[in-house]
């Protein structure tokens, strides 16, 4: 019962315990009377603990009070005349024993360190950064084609892989040693979890990172393209007026033994004037292929870029991980200190009792108990040293993966018609952001500007915490500021992110944001609600939604 609200349940759950104390004929049911007394006692315990977690810990409470409920119910069925004795056992259950047990073992200490608000926010962030199946599928199919693996489209919309070549099942592959060997064929595969929920696709295989076949294709592609590491390509940015570089680098953080504890892909934008700043690697999803021939790329100094990344992010990340590890080490050390001290004290007490019994003439294995104490002391010291080693964190190696030279649209015929006035667009977007942030604050919500992180939306807004559960609702808001009735464009990344996040993704359109009589339209789940009014513009990697349909929209 205690787990129900932790398994994605969004609505309130009501649990009713029905206990029969009398049969239809009017005879007493002893087991029912015992259970009723237990339920009444649990209500009192809930008040004593000051929280609703009593059903989570009922097993521990009964165990600590030496109450074997199953045995009592069996006895009650055979010896109904002992009812008062059973009820007295239930009545003597003491919830304070649970508190003392948790304090002694450090469980209460660990619980005190849990920051629910921070934990919930991290869950939101993890949900937002989850890989989108569309990107995973696109990557796999392109990689399979380059690697020589045939992937076919089925009539039902899913995919099949009729034959996996022997070279993809070779024991020499590193991926097979880690993830296992792929099958010889896959009759039905998908990249979307939702497909597996349909009865017709219950036999489908979900392909994703970590699957044996996915891992093999990944290894094959990386081997094939190994020589391209550190090379350059040319891309197009509809929203820039000057060319710039994007440098992709990978860095790591290591522990005291040199083991990698964190590895991250980073992107650094280098403007025409040489200034560098960090941007999200996902920016690539908002760029288009530059179709025109281009020669003589300008030179760049990758060592300067590496120095910038180390000084402005890698060292910061190291410090962040160090603080997190120091915090965790403190919790673990306090827990170990209390736990080991309690066990050592209990063993010493056994030794004293054993020595007292020896004086009385009993045979006791004191040497075994003393060895047990010494083992505990030694184990405690070793654990403490291991925990201390957790706080050793160093910067690891950094490597240059690739660089993209990004150009403005210029006068490319198929692009120029979509180019907007950058100055006007920038002014409208900034005004719209301010308006939406104030709008959310007026609703009593807590908005955060995340537009620079390129998550696929601009604002993460959290509702006030539920006073009973602490739960907070979230809105991921994409903000658009336009003249009234104008069409709205979403990047492919924004479109797919909205498709992934569904009803927590909102489109806020601010008509005439630079005017005093602006108007806000708030649209939940816009990808689903307005898909009929949208068209894909592949030339600029955008989706365009008819402004008239947005005006008419009513939730």
Image: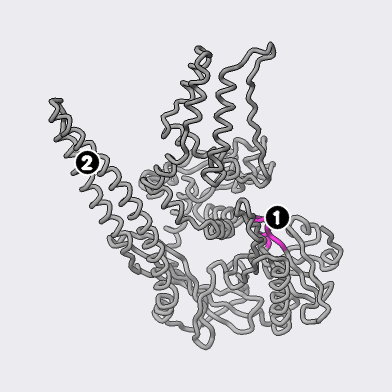
Label 2 Cα crowd, 10 Å radius (few <14 / some 14-19 / many 20+) = some
From the top left corner, tell me how far across and down residue 277 is, in percent. 51, 79
Using the image, tell me which numbered label, if any, was put on residue 282: none
Q: Secondary structure at mark 1?
A: helix
For the C terminus, the quadrant is bottom right
Question: Magenta: predominant secondary structure element?
Answer: helix
Q: Secondary structure at mark 2?
A: helix
Q: Nearer the viewer, mark 1 or mark 2?
A: 2
Q: Which residues are magenta?
A: 495-506
From the top left corner, tell me how far across and down residue 28 is, in percent. 62, 15
Nearest the viewer among 422 and 29 is: 29
In the displayed structure, 299 sits above or below 223; it is: below
- Where is mark 2, residue-wise? 348
For the N terminus, the quadrant is top right
Distance from label 1 to label 2 (Cα)?
A: 59 Å
Label 1 Cα crowd, 10 Å radius (few <14 / some 14-19 / many 20+) = some
- Specify which label sits upstream in the sequence, 1 or 2: 2
Name the residue at 60% across, 17% down: 29
From the top left corner, tell me how far across and down residue 498 is, in percent. 68, 59
In the displayed structure, 32 sits above or below 221; it is: above
User: Is 85 left, or right, of 362 in this rendering?
Assistant: right
């Amino acid at each position: 019962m205690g787990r129900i609200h932790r398994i994605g349940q969004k609505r309130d759950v009501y649990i009713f315990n029905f206990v029969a104390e009398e049969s239809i004929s009017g005879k007493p049911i002893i087991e029912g009377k015992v259970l009723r007394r237990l339920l009444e006692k649990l209500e009192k315990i809930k008040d004593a603990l000051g929280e609703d977690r009593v059903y989570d810990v009922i097993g521990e409470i009964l165990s600590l009070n030496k109450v074997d409920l199953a045995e009592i119910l069996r006895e009650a069925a055979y010896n109904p005349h002992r009812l008062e004795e059973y009820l007295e056992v239930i009545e003597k259950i003491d919830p304070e024993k649970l508190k003392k047990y948790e304090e002694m073992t450090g469980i209460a200490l660990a619980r005190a360190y849990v920051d629910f608000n921070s934990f919930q926010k991290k869950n939101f962030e993890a949900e937002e950064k989850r890989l989108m199946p569309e990107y995973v599928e696109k990557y796999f199919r392109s990689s399979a084609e380059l690697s020589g693996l045939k992937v076919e489209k089925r009539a039902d919309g899913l995919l099949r892989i009729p034959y996996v070549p022997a070279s993809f099942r070779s024991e020499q592959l590193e991926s097979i040693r880690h993830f296992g060997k792929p099958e010889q064929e896959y009759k039905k595969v998908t990249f979307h979890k939702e497909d597996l929920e349909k009865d017709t696709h219950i036999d489908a295989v979900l392909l994703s990172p970590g699957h044996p076949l996915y891992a093999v294709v990944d290894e094959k592609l990386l081997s094939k393209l190994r020589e391209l590491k550190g090379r350059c390509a040319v891309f197009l940015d509809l929203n820039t007026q000057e060319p710039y570089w994007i440098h992709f680098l990978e860095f790591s953080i290591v522990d005291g033994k040199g083991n990698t504890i964190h590895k991250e892909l980073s992107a650094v934008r280098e403007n025409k004037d040489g200034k560098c700043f960090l941007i999200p690697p996902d920016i690539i999803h908002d760029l288009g292929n530059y179709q025109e021939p281009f020669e003589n790329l300008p030179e760049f100094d990758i060592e300067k870029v590496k120095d910038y990344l180390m000084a402005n992010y890698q060292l910061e990340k190291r410090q962040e991980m160090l603080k997190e590890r120091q915090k965790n080490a403190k919790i673990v050390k306090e827990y170990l200190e209390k736990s080991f001290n309690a066990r050592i004290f209990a063993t010493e007490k056994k030794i004293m009792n054993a020595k007292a019994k020896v004086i009385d003439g009993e045979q006791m294995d004191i040497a075994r108990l003393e060895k047990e104490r010494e083992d505990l002391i030694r184990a405690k010291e070793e654990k403490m040293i291991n925990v201390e080693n957790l706080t050793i964190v160093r910067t690891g190696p950094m490597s240059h993966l690739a660089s993209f030279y990004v150009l403005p649209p210029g006068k490319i015929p198929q692009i120029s018609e979509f180019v907007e006035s950058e100055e006007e667009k920038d002014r409208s977007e900034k005004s719209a952001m301010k308006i939406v942030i104030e709008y959310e604050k007026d609703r009593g919500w807590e908005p955060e500007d995340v537009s620079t992180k390129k998550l696929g939306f601009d604002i993460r807004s959290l509702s006030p915490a539920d006073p009973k559960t602490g739960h907070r609702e979230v809105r991921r808001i994409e903000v658009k500021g336009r003249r009234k009735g104008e069409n709205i464009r979403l990047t492919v990344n924004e479109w797919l992110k909205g498709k992934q996040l569904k009803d927590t993704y909102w489109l806020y359109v601010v008509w005439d944001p630079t005017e005093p009589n602006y108007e806000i339209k708030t649209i939940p789940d816009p990808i689903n609600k307005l898909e009929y009014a949208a068209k894909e513009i592949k030339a600029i990697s955008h989706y365009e939604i008819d402004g008239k349909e947005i005006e008419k929209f009513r939730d």
